[in-house]
Amino acid sequence: GGPPCVDFSYVNAQRRGTEGEQGQYLVRFGRFIRSLERAQSVRFGRQHNTFFMVENVVLRGDDLETVRNAFGIQWDPVEMDALYLSPTRRRRHFFTNILCDFDLSGFTYTGELSHVSPTSCLEPGFVLPADIFGEGLITTKANCFMASTSRLDERNTMRMYVVRKKKYTHGKETKLICRPMNVLEREKCMGYPAGYVETAVRTLYEALFKNGFGGSGQKWREDLDEKYHKFAGNYHKLPKDAYDFEFIGTGEMGEKRMLMAPPPTSQTVSFYGAEEYAKHLIGNAYSVPVMELLLRPLTQICPSRQYNGYDYNYEWTTASNMYRPPRRQPTETAAASANPELSTMLRQRIQSPPSPLPNRRETN
């Protein structure tokens, strides 16, 4: 799971931690997991284990202790930054009882760790500003993608921008073309197949667009396919100072402009265009290579199944198959300590030689 991080994020000056309305979701999630563990234990006994993994931004102090108590764990969450395995930064805490037999806490960010550059995920000719204005190492990483409306593109700081040099016809002068990273580039940097988010959002907006002009005040569920019913809301008659519906043409995602409000909250309602909403979703998403690494121990505990058509190559060349984090002494999870057979199996797995990280992702 991934409850909202708005009350824990340090970029939010009004964050309230676990006392906030959004912060309480993480606490309730932990209590739900404990209730589920008790119910499973009553029904199946100790031989049935409930594994969980919950992601959020890095927590500190009282908030961290409150969340640990909610999940009933005595150990610290796994702290992982996606820069070690992908072209983008994304430092997160993972609260889990899945045994992770590696430790990245003692490492510093150097070129020896991960030669993964965003360049292969960008449109041809575009690079990060650091590659032009700075020293530009191959290990320069894209900044962590944000989900809040005001930080989707970071236009004030240009943290989400890429640049390309363009020569004039006489070839003597150059100018820089700057723009925010687009949806496709962000998908690739996070490890998702091209179009994984963009295609779904475009399909949703096209469905909304067909009914948007004549459906003011009407609930979306009244004329949308059932698969879209989770998008709570209704067609809005937008105020004069807000965006209007525009129909420029067909083709690219940005040429059909339809603005959608998220589910109502206590905060000011924001309207998203299709591209903005796709970027918002990516800002809330998991880093695929990080989840692949953290969930891999389950493949040696649970039955696996290969799904045809779900294998794909990441867009970057990675050195992760040549890099193995140092081993640390086995630490039993709560599930393992409650089940001697599982504990023995996990210890045997830890003591066996590690398999290299593949370039090609397999979904189990």
Image (tube, grey):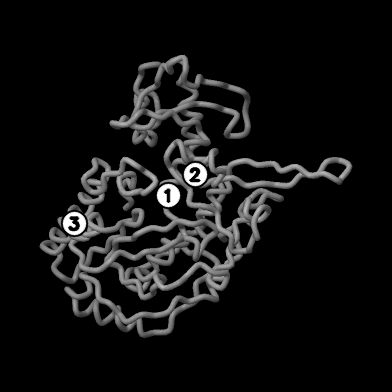
The answer to whether 242 is drawn above or below residue 105 in the figure is above
Residue type beneath disc 2 = Val
Mark closest to the chain's N terminus, 3 or 1: 3
| Tag in front: 3 or 1 | 3
Spatial separation of the CA atoms under disc 1 and disc 2: 10 Å
Spatial separation of the CA atoms under disc 2 and disc 3: 32 Å
| Tag in front: 2 or 3 | 3
Residue type beneath disc 3 = Ala
Q: Quadrant of the C terminus?
A: bottom left
Q: Position of residue 360 (x, y in %)?
A: 54, 65
* Circle 3 residues within 10 Å: few <14, some 14–19, many ≥20: some
Picture quadrant where residue 119 is located: bottom right
Q: Position of residue 204 (x, y in %)?
A: 46, 33
SS category of the residue bearing label 2 = loop
SS category of the residue bearing label 1 = loop
Q: Are marks 1 and 2 in contact (CB under 8 Å)?
A: yes
The answer to whether 153 is drawn above or below residue 234 in the figure is below
From the viewer's perspective, tell me whether residue 238 is left or right of residue 27: right
Mark closest to the chain's N terminus, 1 or 2: 2
* Circle on res. 187: none
* Circle 2 residues within 10 Å: few <14, some 14–19, many ≥20: many
**Along the line of sight, the residue nearer the viewer: 64 or 125:** 64
Q: Are marks 3 and 1 in contact (CB under 8 Å)?
A: no
* Circle on res. 70: 3
User: Would you name the residue on which mark 2 appears?
Assistant: 197
User: Would you name the residue on which mark 1 appears?
Assistant: 285
Residue at 82% from the left image edge and 44% from the top image edge = 173
Q: Position of residue 117 (x, y in %)?
A: 60, 60
Mark closest to the chain's N terminus, 2 or 3: 3
